[in-house]
Image: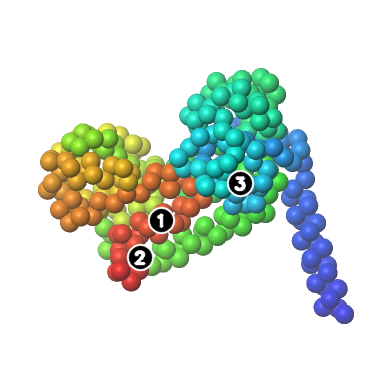
């Protein structure tokens, strides 16, 4: 009997904690550092950006999505939802037609206009690290009343990241680069320090040959040749640009056929652990039975 009463008490406390966590109004902080008041639980959510769509689906709030912006990275689950134009330039009129009570991801003039019309808008900061992804998940979860599910998702991602790191721990780091080359023999943009690509290379058992440079600078092909990465990661559509570069034929990654496509959207996603696993497997196939 005591055990049963204890179970009922624990269960009741859990339900109470969830109810308290989901009480509205709530306040969250956006990319501008401004506090955004969410007066009631959002029931008609519009998402501009694939990351917001993924988060809502993964934390069990996907049924409340009423419209999305066009993006090639949108999950298949939202293929039939109305569109409000491209993610980089959505239509204010189309957004209003969806009658949202929360818009995720609007910025610039679009956000200004929506806020003038008293539409609640929440946009989180740029993703430059795993903690940034976790912060975005947590902020969105709190805003839509699914904070517990958001914390569970963060835990799942973190657990997978730790598991992957454990497999490459102690192995000699592989010299690698994350870069984007728009056409053969054109100077690429490289991911340096302060980018999530840099962090993932480190966590996957690599060493970023451009870790001494910040952001996403453009470098010369001669500089890339001199640094001679063993592995190159790029957008899948740009792999052939690297293999097709006459100047890069002598780079170790090109000579050895170790140029791989990883979508940029995959590393700023709730699927980031899957992207990390792919990077780690390509850097250290022996650690994964390859």
- Disc 3 to disc 2, C-alpha distance: 32 Å
Residue that mark 2 sits on: 168
Q: Which quadrant is the C terminus positioned in?
A: bottom left
The residue wearing badge 1 is 276
Q: Which residue is painted at 82% across and 73% down in the image?
A: 6
Q: Is residue 288 left or right of residue 90?
A: left
| Residue drawn at 66 percent across, 26 percent down | 97
Residue at 26 percent across and 58 percent down: it is 174
Kindly report which numbered mark, 3 or 2, lies closer to the viewer in this rendering: 3
Tag 1's secondary structure? Answer: helix
- The single residue placed furthest to the bottom in the displayed view is 1
Q: Nearer the viewer, mark 3 or mark 1?
A: 3
**Above or below: residue 56 compared with residue 154:** above
Q: Position of residue 213 (x, y in %)?
A: 30, 39
Q: Nearer the viewer, residue 248 or 132?
A: 248
Q: Nearer the viewer, mark 1 or mark 2?
A: 1
Question: Quarter-wise, where is residue 34 in the image?
Answer: top right
| Residue at 18% over, 42% down | 244
Left or right for 165, reference 137: left
Q: Identify the residue position indicated by label 3 in the image.
A: 56
Q: Outermost residue, right direction?
A: 1
């Amino acid at each position: 009997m005591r055990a049963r009463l204890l179970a009922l008490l624990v269960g009741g406390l859990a339900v109470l904690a969830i109810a308290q966590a989901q009480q509205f109004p709530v306040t969250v902080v956006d990319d501008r550092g401004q506090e955004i008041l969410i007066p009631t639980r959002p029931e008609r959510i519009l998402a501009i950006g694939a990351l917001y769509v993924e988060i809502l689906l993964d934390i069990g709030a996907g049924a409340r999505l009423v419209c999305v912006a066009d993006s090639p990275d949108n999950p298949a689950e939202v293929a039939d939802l109305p569109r409000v134009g491209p993610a980089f330039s959505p239509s204010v009129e189309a957004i209003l037609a969806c009658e949202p009570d929360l818009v995720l991801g609007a910025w610039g003039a679009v956000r200004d206009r929506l806020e003038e019309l008293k539409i609640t808008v929440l946009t989180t900061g740029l993703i430059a690290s795993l903690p940034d992804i976790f912060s975005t998940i947590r902020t969105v979860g709190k805003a839509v009343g699914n904070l517990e599910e958001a914390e569970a998702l963060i835990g799942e991602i973190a657990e997978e990241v730790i598991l992957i790191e454990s497999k490459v721990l102690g192995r000699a780091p592989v010299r690698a680069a994350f870069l984007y080359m728009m056409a053969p023999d054109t100077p690429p943009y490289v991911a340096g320090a302060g980018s999530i690509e840099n962090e993932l290379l480190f966590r996957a058992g690599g060493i970023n040959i451009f870790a001494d440079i910040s952001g996403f600078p453009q470098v010369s092909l001669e500089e890339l040749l001199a640094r001679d990465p063993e592995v190159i990661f790029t957008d899948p559509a740009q792999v052939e640009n690297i293999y097709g570069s006459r100047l890069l034929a002598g780079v170790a990654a090109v000579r050895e056929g170790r140029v791989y496509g990883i979508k940029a959207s995959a590393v700023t996603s709730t699927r980031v652990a899957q992207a990390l696993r792919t990077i780690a497997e390509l850097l250290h196939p022996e650690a994964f039975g390859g």
